[in-house]
Image (cartoon, rainbow, N blue to C red):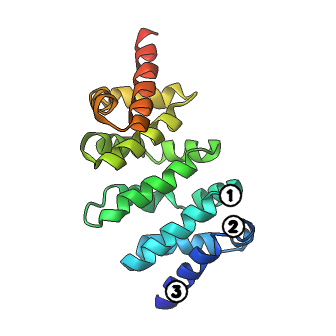
């Protein structure tokens, strides 16, 4: 296990360079090994794997590779992990990058991430509430089914609160979601 964790730390360092993102991502088994470490490594191993995966997923093709390697299972588990303070931050950071890709966006929705993101809107730390709103907005753009799901799950109240008390970015994301939800209710 220690060797795999050291490898993850090395991949994290190497993944900072754009050319390496392509090479590492296309190496058979590299992303899968990081996803496995994200699920079962030590705290340090999980952190290094998460950071390496984030860096790799900045490159478009690696986003799909990570989703196909099963990254969503540990990410959703991390959203629920209050015992490890950085786990939620790490999961949201990676999900925000993945949500910018259409295929990944669909996979995130199918993995039932929306209820966990809405839970974070209700009770998460300020930064996590902001990031959850940004991801939910990305998932709802041009997707009436996801938007309806957000409405059914009662996101309006925490979004209204975020629109009043959040950072400028959080206010923009929450207000945009509320506008989309109000249009959905008119239809």
Q: Earlier in the sequence, mark 3 or mark 1?
A: 3
Camera-side residue: 27 or 124?
Answer: 124
Residue plotted at (43% across, 62% down) = 74
Using the image, determine if residue 98 lies above or below residue 21. above
Using the image, determine if residue 101 lies above or below residue 87. above
Residue under label 2, please give it: 21
Residue under label 3, please give it: 6
Outermost residue toward the bottom?
3
Q: Position of residue 154 (x, y in %)?
A: 30, 29
For marks 3 and 1, give the CA distance: 23 Å
Residue 87 visible here: yes
Outermost residue toward the front?
168
Dot 3: what SS? helix
Q: Earlier in the sequence, mark 1 or mark 2?
A: 2
Q: Earlier in the sequence, mark 2 or mark 3?
A: 3
Q: Position of residue 117 (x, y in %)?
A: 37, 44
Residue 35 visible here: no
- Badge 1 crowding class, 10 Å Cα cut-off, few under 14, some 14 to 19, many 20 or more, is some
For marks 1 and 2, give the CA distance: 7 Å
Residue plotted at (37% across, 76% down) = 43
Residue plotted at (51% across, 68% down) = 51
Camera-side residue: 70 or 31?
Answer: 31
Dot 1: what SS? loop
Q: Position of residue 24 (x, y in %)?
A: 69, 72
- Badge 3 crowding class, 10 Å Cα cut-off, few under 14, some 14 to 19, many 20 or more, is some
23 left or right, relative to 149: right
Camera-side residue: 106 or 5?
Answer: 5
Q: Are marks 1 and 2 in contact (CB under 8 Å)?
A: yes
Identify the mark at residue 59; answer none if there is no mark: 1
């Amino acid at each position: 296990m220690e060797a795999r964790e050291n490898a993850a730390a090395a991949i994290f360092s190497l993944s900072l360079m754009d050319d390496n993102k392509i090479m590492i991502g296309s190496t058979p088994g590299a992303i899968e090994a990081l996803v496995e470490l994200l699920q079962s490594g030590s705290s340090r191993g999980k952190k290094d794997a998460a950071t390496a995966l984030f860096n790799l997923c900045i490159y478009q093709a690696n986003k799909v590779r990570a989703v196909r390697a099963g990254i969503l299972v540990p990410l959703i588990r991390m959203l629920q992990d209050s015992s490890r303070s950085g786990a939620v931050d790490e999961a949201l950071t990676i999900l925000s990058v993945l949500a910018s890709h259409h295929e990944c966006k669909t996979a995130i929705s199918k993995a039932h991430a929306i209820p966990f993101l809405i839970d974070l809107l209700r009770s998460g730390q300020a930064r996590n509430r902001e990031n959850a709103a940004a991801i939910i907005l990305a998932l709802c753009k041009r997707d009436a089914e996801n938007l309806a799901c957000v409405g059914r799950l009662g996101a309006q109240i925490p979004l209204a609160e975020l629109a009043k008390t959040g950072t400028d970015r959080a206010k923009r994301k929450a207000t945009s979601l509320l506008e989309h939800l109000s249009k959905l209710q008119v239809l």
